[in-house]
Image: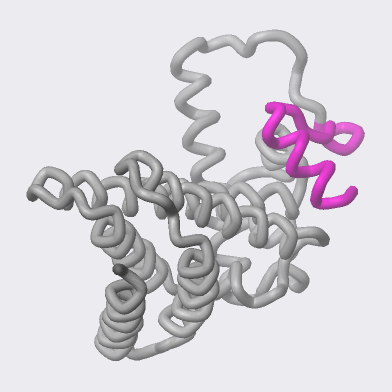
Amino acid sequence: MSSRVVRQEHEDGGGVKAPPGEEHPPGRPAGGARTSERGAATRSALLAAAEEVFTSVGFAQAGVTEVVARAGASVGSLYHHFSGKADLFLTLYEEFQRRQQDRTRAANHAARDAGEDDPMRLLLAGARAYLDGCIEERALSRLFLSGDGPPGFDAIVRRRLRDWTNRNAALFRRAGEPADEPFLVVFSGTMAAATSEVSLNDDEEHARALADEVLDIIASLSDARRP
């Protein structure tokens, strides 16, 4: 199954049926909220196990049986929650991106609460939070940058980068200022390179210092382009 199909099924709330003999019983399971809590716990355990396996051996070498063994679950329960190994990987990526959005949003709000209204300074605050997230979740960030993912994953990453750039441009529109499109292109490319560098750096202190220096350069470039 292609990554595109898997992603669409995941977004639509669907999935691939479990192999014969492992189907989940039809109808609403008995137990109500208690069963729902167990299901949520199983799903979380499967994702945590998948993260451990993927970050240790990579996507291509990972096996569903190893994931369910680490999670203390069954193959049937995995296929109840996910359509397969690719869906686990893509869900980890989407949840990582959601946490990154939360980090950047919180940084923007904190800067605004402190009285900052310059869109460029807000942009840099969000960028700092994004790089911090890559450092804090280095193993996952490295995994998504490794090139070892489901077919079509690179296209998903590129689309996410475009979306992120568009959200940054919106900071300027909300402030009533024209977005400097050439600068945003350079900014996005620089951030992509910085994300890779800080994620692959084993020295956390050095990674954070590098992030600071990159953002200082971006700020200087922005100041130089202002009238």
Q: Residue furthest left?
A: 114
Q: Residue furthest front?
A: 227
- Report if residue 150 is visible in the image: yes
Residue 22 position in % (x across, y down): 81, 33
Picture quarter with the C terminus: bottom left
Total marks placed = 0
Q: Write the residue at 11% across / 44% down.
A: 113
Depth check: give the residue in front, 170 or 81.
170
* Residue 25 sits in quarter: top right
Depth check: give the residue in front, 150 or 52.
150
Q: Write the residue at 66% across / 54% down.
A: 159
Q: How is the image coloured?
A: one colour
Residue 62 position in % (x across, y down): 72, 67
- Report if residue 211 is visible in the image: no
Tell whether 84 sits left or right of 159: right
Q: Write the residue at 52% across / 12% down.
A: 31
Depth check: give the residue in front, 24 or 177.
177
Tell whether 57 sits left or right of 121: right
* Residue 129 sits in quarter: bottom left
Tell whether 136 sits left or right of 42: left
Tell whether 98 sits left or right of 53: left
Residue 146 position in % (x across, y down): 64, 77
Looking at the image, is 18 positioned above or below residue 220?
above
* Residue 155 sits in quarter: bottom right
Query: Magenta residues, as a range?
Result: 1-22
Q: Write the residue at 70% across / 40% down.
A: 82
Looking at the image, is 2 positioned above or below residue 226?
above
